[in-house]
Image (spheres, grey):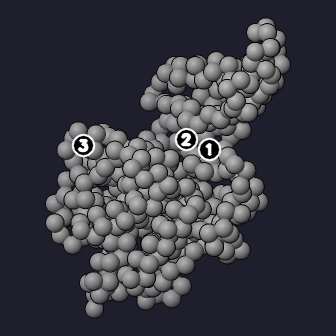
């Protein structure tokens, strides 16, 4: 095992300990105590690697190796460090750790870049706490307004700014970043699917990222006593939600073309065993490689939900997130393939069925992304695992690409 591989395993193992669900996967919600522990570890490592470290007004973390060109745009490498509840140790942190190890190689080999190198660790990509997802990257490029950010609340009614302040983050720091300060963004991620493992190929160069939307559906009825309210006098919000949920899969199946739909979160109020539910709130995640398919299923979902506004039931639907399918930068895709070939690391082209921070940045700077295999195609679960040998290969590819993009001067 080489040094890079050892460091990758060390960092991922360390970050996996910052979880609120030990032995039950990684649960690291944004602005939680576990977030604070992880961010302190990441910042400490950045400083050890000789980077200048700071955070922005969202809590995104940056570690910068200055370049020789004054006020030049940076080449950014990184990913996110939050998790879904009871998730795995690799989704997000693998990309942050890869960025750290690229910076370590720059330091170890005493490389001086012309363009600055920045390692980034982004918040709330998953949307597991504040909904919508991709919050850190969307906020950074101005797609999430300061007012909308302040109004975001978690399921317990706690706001973003309140929770930031609890862990000592400064909410008044600059939030939006000028795209002119970004020369390129590179992201490594685990595939979260079975293709690379089945093909026995260690690297996937991402051609395009699927388009996605997230909707939040609210169904309101009338609370009542479970024993004294006759069945024909009920306005049961959960029963109505269940009828809607049962039909969602067919919308994606009928649309075809790889379109998928998922109802991932369901909250019932007041959530008592002997109370007829007054309100249910659930999320609907719609994804497809073609924008017209996403739009068609959004329209059909809205029609379906609205059709149940009757007999004491009121339904509403809010669009939390909408991102078009994105083709990544052709030149950087070519560069990543070229570096893979020169290093004699087999690769293939691949499309991403998951959304990533890379898709947000792709409208503002040149973006490239590489995948490494996921064991059994599993992700968002404790069994999520990727081989550190594959991650070390990816680091070497990113390192060579970063040298090219930063126009390194060797001392």
The 10 Å Cα crowd at callout 2, few under 14, some 14 to 19, many 20 or more, is many
Instruction: Identify the disc placed on residue 100.
Output: none
Residue toward you, 278 or 259: 278
Q: Residue at x 42, y 68 (%)?
A: 77
Instruction: Identify the disc placed on residue 212.
Output: 2
Question: Residue 163's x, y, as percent?
Answer: 67, 62
Residue ID for mark 1:
322
What is the quadrant of residue 11 in the picture?
Answer: bottom left
How many numbered markers are drawn? 3
Marks 1 and 2 close (CB-CB < 8 Å): yes
Residue toward you, 376 or 134: 376
| Quadrant for the C terminus in the image | bottom left
Question: Residue 346's x, y, as percent?
Answer: 19, 53
Instruction: Name the mark nearer the viewer: 2 or 3.
Output: 3
Question: Residue 205's x, y, as percent?
Answer: 32, 52
Q: Secondary structure at mark 2?
A: strand
| Quadrant for the N terminus in the image | bottom left
Instruction: Name the mark nearer the viewer: 3 or 1.
Output: 3
Query: In the rendered structure, which disc, 2 or 3, sits on the residue that comes first in sequence?
Result: 3
Query: In the rendered structure, which disc, 3 or 1, sits on the residue that comes first in sequence?
Result: 3
């Amino acid at each position: 095992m080489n040094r890079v591989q050892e460091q990758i395993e060390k960092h991922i193992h360390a970050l996996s300990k910052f979880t609120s669900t030990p032995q039950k996967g990684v649960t690291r919600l944004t602005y939680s105590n576990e977030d604070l522990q992880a961010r302190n570890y990441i910042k400490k490592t950045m400083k050890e690697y000789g980077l200048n470290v700071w955070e922005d007004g969202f809590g995104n973390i940056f570690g910068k190796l200055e370049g020789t060109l004054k006020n030049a745009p940076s080449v950014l490498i990184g990913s996110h460090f939050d998790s879904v509840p009871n998730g795995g140790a690799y989704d997000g942190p693998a990309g942050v750790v890869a960025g750290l190890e690229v910076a370590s190689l720059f330091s170890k080999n005493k490389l001086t870049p012309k363009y600055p190198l920045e390692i980034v660790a982004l918040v709330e990509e998953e949307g597991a706490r504040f909904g919508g997802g991709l919050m850190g990257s969307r906020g950074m490029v101005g797609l999430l307004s300061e007012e909308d950010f302040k109004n975001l609340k978690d399921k317990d009614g706690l706001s973003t700014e309140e929770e930031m302040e609890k862990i000592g983050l400064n909410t008044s720091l600059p939030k939006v970043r000028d795209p002119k300060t970004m020369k390129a963004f590179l992201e490594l991620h685990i595939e979260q699917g079975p293709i690379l493992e089945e093909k026995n190929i260690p690297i996937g160069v991402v051609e395009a990222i699927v388009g996605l939307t997230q909707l939040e559906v609210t169904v309101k009825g009338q609370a009542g006593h479970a024993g004294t309210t006759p069945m024909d006098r009920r306005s049961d919000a959960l029963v109505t939600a269940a009828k809607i949920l049962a039909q969602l899969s067919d919308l994606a199946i009928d649309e075809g073309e790889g379109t998928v739909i998922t109802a991932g979160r369901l909250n019932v109020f007041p959530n008592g065993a002997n109370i007829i539910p007054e309100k249910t709130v659930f999320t609907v995640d719609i994804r497809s490689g073609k924008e017209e398919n996403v739009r068609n299923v959004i329209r059909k979902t809205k029609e379906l939900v609205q059709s149940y506004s009757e007999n004491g039931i009121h339904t509403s639907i809010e669009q939390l997130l909408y991102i078009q399918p994105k083709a990544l930068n052709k030149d950087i895709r070519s560069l990543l393939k070229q570096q893979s070939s020169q290093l004699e690391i087999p690769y293939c082209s691949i499309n991403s069925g998951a959304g990533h921070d890379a898709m947000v940045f792709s409208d503002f700077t040149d973006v490239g992304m590489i995948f490494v295999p996921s064991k059994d195609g599993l992700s968002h679960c404790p069994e999520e695992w990727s081989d550190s040998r594959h991650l070390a290969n990816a680091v070497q590819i990113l390192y060579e690409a970063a040298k090219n993009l930063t126009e390194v001067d060797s001392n």
